[in-house]
Amino acid sequence: MQHLYFEEDPWVTGMHGMQIKADLPFGEEVKNYDVLVLPGGRPGGANLQANPAVIQMVQYFDQNGKYIAAMCSGTVVLSDAGVITGKRVTGYTGYEEKLIGGIFEHKVVVADQNLITSQGPATPYPFAYKIAEVLGKDVSQLKEKMLYHFAKGKEE
């Protein structure tokens, strides 16, 4: 997976101060990717939403039937790009009002046609597994090795 950046500085700071060094600048080569993944967090979702190049890339992926995955506040980009109309989606708590045109479901992960959406910060594993599954990967052994089924529903 390639991590992309928009400015000259490849260091991206997340909502909780975690820094990740991105691999490549965001550009036309993204059109060759199999999946466009939009992370969430604040102000990440708003930053993506405000970037016309991101909106155009989301629309390109949708028009070409390519997968678009978004989680948490990154899901608002899908609404702004106009790619969720009539499709089942999920997003962060309270995003029923923000995901205009989509059919909101209160589920951890929702996959409908070329869209994969996930609720929020606690959902990266089911989100990643669903992305792998739509790309034709069998994740059952990985889930077993990572104790995914064991941990699911075992909260104290």
Image (cartoon, rainbow, N blue to C red):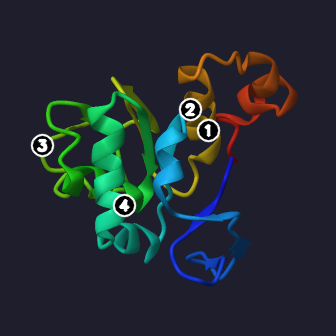
Residue 140 in sight from this viewpoint: yes
Q: Is mark 3 on a helix, strand or loop?
A: loop
Answer few, some or many: residues within 10 Å of disc 3's Cα (few below 14, many 20 plus, some between 14 and 19). Answer: some
Whether label 1 touches label 2, CB < 8 Å: yes
Residue located beneath label 2 in the image? 131
Residue located beneath label 1 in the image? 128
Q: What element carries label 4?
A: helix
Q: Quadrant of residue 151?
A: top right
Q: Where is residue 80 in the image (x, y as percent from the top left)?
A: 20, 57
Residue located beneath label 4 in the image? 54
Whether label 2 touches label 3, CB < 8 Å: no
Amino acid type shown at disc 3: Gly
Whether label 1 touches label 4, CB < 8 Å: no
Q: Is residue 100 left or right of residue 39?
A: left
Amino acid type shown at disc 2: Ile
3D distance between C-alphas at marks 3 and 4: 19 Å
Residue located beneath label 3 in the image? 101
Q: Which residue is drawn at 15% across and 37% down?
A: 85
Q: Which residue is drawn at 33% across and 71% down?
A: 51
Residue situated furthest front in the rendering: 28
Q: Is 144 rendered above or below residue 24?
A: above
Q: In this view, does 92 lie to the left or right of 18?
A: left
Amino acid type shown at disc 1: Ala
Q: Quadrant of residue 33?
A: top right
3D distance between C-alphas at marks 1 and 4: 21 Å
Q: Which of marks 1 and 4 is nearer the N terminus?
A: 4
3D distance between C-alphas at marks 2 and 3: 23 Å
Residue 42 in sight from this viewpoint: no
